[in-house]
Amino acid sequence: MSYSNSDFTNCPEIPQVLPQIVRRESLPSPEGEEIFTLPRWNCFCCRDTGIVRYHLAKYAIRDYDPKRDANPICQRCGLGSRWMHLKGNIDMQISKDTCEKLDTWDRKNWEESLQDLLENNQVNKDFVDNTVAVIATSKSIRRRARTHEENQNAQYKHQLVSSDRYEAVQSEEE
Ligand SMILES: [Zn+2]
């Protein structure tokens, strides 16, 4: 619903101010850009908990079952000391040397995953940018109005632009 000036004739007099234009560069980065950072743990072996994380411990302890077995203490970072009171429920068998290796390995995995994520993000961004450019071009050279079916296809396509199914749909149509 839009108003013309005459709609406000009965409105009480309100002092009018000028709009404040948003300067986009002054806004904080949109969410999604900041998640692409490495976790801030000092120790990736135990993620600063003092207990070697399950996905790592299972490589160092045969058939390790966290529900059944004692907590493997991290000997790399010193935070394991906070669990020393749990006598009978701690396992000191994973050596400092092994914890060091698990830390390095997990850190490397995170860095690689992060790299993949960043590259995928760039691919998706390029894809969307290119798609938008193609759509803009095809719109500007359209010589006749869309048929009902074309309109529906266009709407469907529009809904899919940001989803990962778009590529498949697009190649079917070509
Ligand atoms: Zn640790």
Image: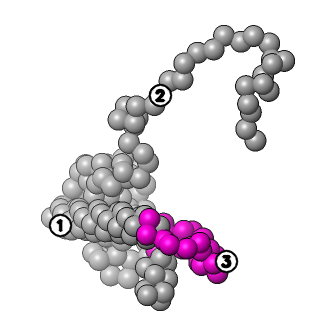
Of marks 2 and 3, the one in the foreground: 3
Q: Position of residue 45 (x, y in %)?
A: 28, 61
- Residue behind mark 3: 148
- Using residue 80 as the reference point, say whether residue 20 is left or right of it: right
Q: Amino acid at mark 3?
A: His
* Mark 1 within 8 Å of ligand 1, using the beta carbon: no
Q: Residues within 10 Å of mark 2 (few under 14, many from 20)?
A: few
Question: Vertically, is 25 above or below 120?
Answer: above
> Can residue 152 be found in the magenta stretch?
yes
Distance, label 3 to label 1, CA atoms, is: 62 Å
Q: Position of residue 66 (x, y in %)?
A: 45, 71
Q: Which of disc 2 and disc 1 is earlier in sequence?
A: 2
Q: Which of disc 1 and disc 3 is earlier in sequence?
A: 1
Foreground residue, 110 or 2?
Answer: 2
Q: Which mark is residue 55?
A: none
Q: Which mark is residue 21?
A: 2
Numbered range of the magenta stretch: 140-164
